């Protein structure tokens, strides 16, 4: 599966969060292909998921199950769009709070990484 994380606006976000996102993207490469896009155009032809406070909230195990269902449903390229108004197949929430883009991206990638660990019954801290 290819996972794209598209960040619409990164104004005011720090390097520490960017480095955290890059670390989780690197860890995820053993499970899937990860593409990080900054200030990318919002046009995307694959399965688009908006990430915003009004989306569906998941527990970590439920997010893992949701990712597995996408793969089982034949979706091989999914893009998570953070920080913009988009028409998406669905929307998920990382929190009820509005998060800066880089924070949201790092948190999303960590939860996707955790989801893959859960799906493979691999150890990961709780």
Image (cartoon, grey):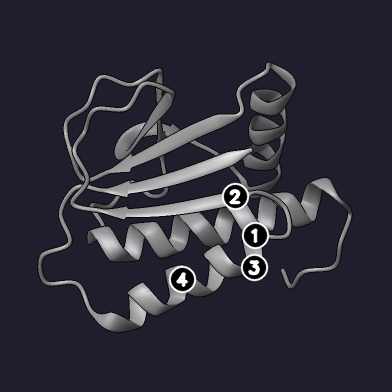
Secondary element at image label 1: loop
Q: Quadrant of residue 81?
A: top left
Q: Residues within 10 Å of mark 4 (few under 14, many from 20)?
A: some
Q: Earlier in the sequence, mark 4 or mark 3?
A: 4
For the residues bearing labels 3 and 1, Cβ distance under 8 angstroms? yes
Q: CA distance from mark 3 to mark 1?
A: 5 Å
* Marker disc for residue 8: none
Q: Nearer the viewer, residue 110 or 60?
A: 110
For the residues bearing labels 1 and 2, Cβ distance under 8 angstroms? yes
Looking at the image, residue 1 lies above or below residue 46:
below
Q: Earlier in the sequence, mark 1 or mark 4?
A: 4
Q: Nearer the viewer, residue 49 or 34?
A: 34
Q: Quadrant of residue 20?
A: bottom left
Secondary element at image label 4: helix
Please name the residue that numbered disc 2 is placed on: 33
Q: CA distance from mark 1 to mark 4?
A: 11 Å
* Marker disc for residue 22: 4
Q: Which quadrant would the C terminus be assigned to in this image? A: bottom right
Q: Earlier in the sequence, mark 2 or mark 4?
A: 4
Q: Residue furthest left?
A: 11
Q: Residues within 10 Å of mark 1 (few under 14, many from 20)?
A: few
Horizontally, residue 29 falls left or right of residue 51, namely: right
Q: Residue furthest right?
A: 121
x, y percentage for residue 73? Answer: 68, 16
Q: CA distance from mark 1 to mark 2?
A: 5 Å
Please name the residue that numbered disc 1 is placed on: 29
Secondary element at image label 3: helix
Horizontally, residue 89 falls left or right of residue 64, namely: left
Kindly report which numbered mark, 2 or 3, lies closer to the viewer in this rendering: 2
For the point 30% across and 40% down, which residue is it? 52
Please name the residue that numbered disc 3 is placed on: 27
């Amino acid at each position: 599966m290819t996972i794209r994380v598209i960040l619409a606006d990164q104004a005011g976000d720090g390097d520490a969060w960017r480095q955290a996102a890059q670390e989780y993207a690197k860890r995820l490469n053993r499970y899937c292909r990860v593409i990080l896009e900054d200030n990318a155009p919002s046009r995307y032809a694959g399965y688009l998921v908006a990430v915003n406070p009004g989306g569906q909230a998941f527990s970590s195990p439920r997010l893992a199950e949701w990712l597995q269902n996408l793969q089982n449903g034949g979706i091989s390229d999914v893009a998570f769009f953070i920080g913009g108004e988009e028409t998406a197949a669905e929307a998920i929430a990382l929190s009820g709070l509005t998060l800066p883009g880089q924070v949201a991206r790092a948190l999303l990638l960590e939860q996707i990484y955790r989801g893959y660990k859960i799906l493979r019954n691999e150890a990961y801290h709780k």
